[in-house]
């Protein structure tokens, strides 16, 4: 994190997250690939491994993943001012668009053209969420432990109807216990990830 941040950097953070917020439909999960593309690949502000951790933390705490991850990334780049710039950037398009839509939606919601457009948008949103899940799984599931945790989580949520927050807490607790009881295994996993 930079001690002193110039206005140009804050402006760049704001406009990048403004663009992401304005062009991403489907909520935070649909934003994940765009956020990763902008901050990891294009601008190289943070490393690929770090962005996975950012998304994990953002999903583990209350609030929308898009806002949480944008705030976290903004803070990592430029401290508090960066966090504010990123958060305002990602939130502003939604506030403006929702306000405009809410003012006229009642008049058009039963229109067949509008319903057809929403049907198409829903399909694209599901695809974007699938891409985000696939991308995160390639980076997050790299060893037997994470593969087992992934499988247990999927089965628990889909078939046993357990609450996702319970699975997040269980995953964190499992990681803590593995670190405490098998520190050599954790070091081996970290070394494997660094070599990949």
Image (spheres, rainbow, N blue to C red):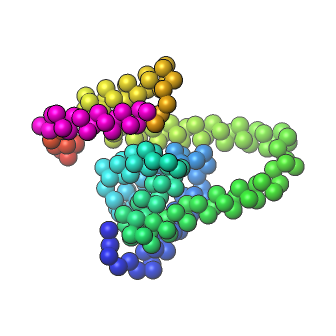
Q: In front: 28, or 83?
A: 83
Q: Is residue 35 left or right of residue 46?
A: right
**Can you tell which quarter of the image residue 56 is in?**
top left
Residue 35 visible in this rendered orientation of the protein: no
161 shown above or below 117: above
Q: Quadrant of the N terminus?
A: bottom left
Q: Is residue 16 magenta?
A: no
- In magenta, the rendered stretch is 166-185
**Residue extending farthest left:** 184
Residue at the (41%, 60%) spot, across then down? 73
Number of marks in picture? 0
Prevalent SS, magenta region? helix
Q: Is residue 37 above or below residue 43?
A: above
Residue nearest the viewer, comparing 32 with 188: 188
**Residue at 85% over, 48% down:** 106
Image check: 60 left or right of 140? right
Say if 94 sits above or below 158 in the image: below
């Amino acid at each position: 994190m930079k001690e002193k941040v110039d206005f140009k950097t804050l402006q760049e953070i704001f406009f990048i997250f403004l663009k992401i917020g304005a062009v991403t439909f489907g909520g935070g999960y649909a934003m994940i690939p765009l956020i990763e593309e902008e901050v990891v690949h294009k601008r190289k502000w943070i490393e690929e491994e770090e962005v996975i951790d950012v998304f994990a933390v953002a999903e583990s705490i209350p609030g929308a993943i898009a806002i949480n991850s944008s705030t976290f990334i903004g803070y990592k780049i430029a401290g508090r001012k960066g966090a504010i710039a990123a958060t305002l950037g990602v939130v502003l398009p939604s506030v403006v668009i929702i306000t405009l839509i809410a003012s006229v939606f009642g008049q058009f919601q039963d229109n067949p053209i509008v319903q057809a457009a929403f049907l198409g948008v829903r399909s694209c949103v599901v695809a974007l969420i699938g891409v985000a899940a696939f991308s995160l799984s390639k980076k997050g599931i790299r060893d037997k432990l994470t593969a087992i945790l992934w499988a247990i989580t999927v089965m628990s949520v889909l078939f046993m109807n357990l609450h996702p927050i319970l699975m997040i807490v269980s995953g964190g607790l499992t990681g803590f216990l593995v670190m405490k009881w098998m520190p050599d295994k954790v070091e081996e996993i970290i070394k494997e990830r660094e070599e990949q």
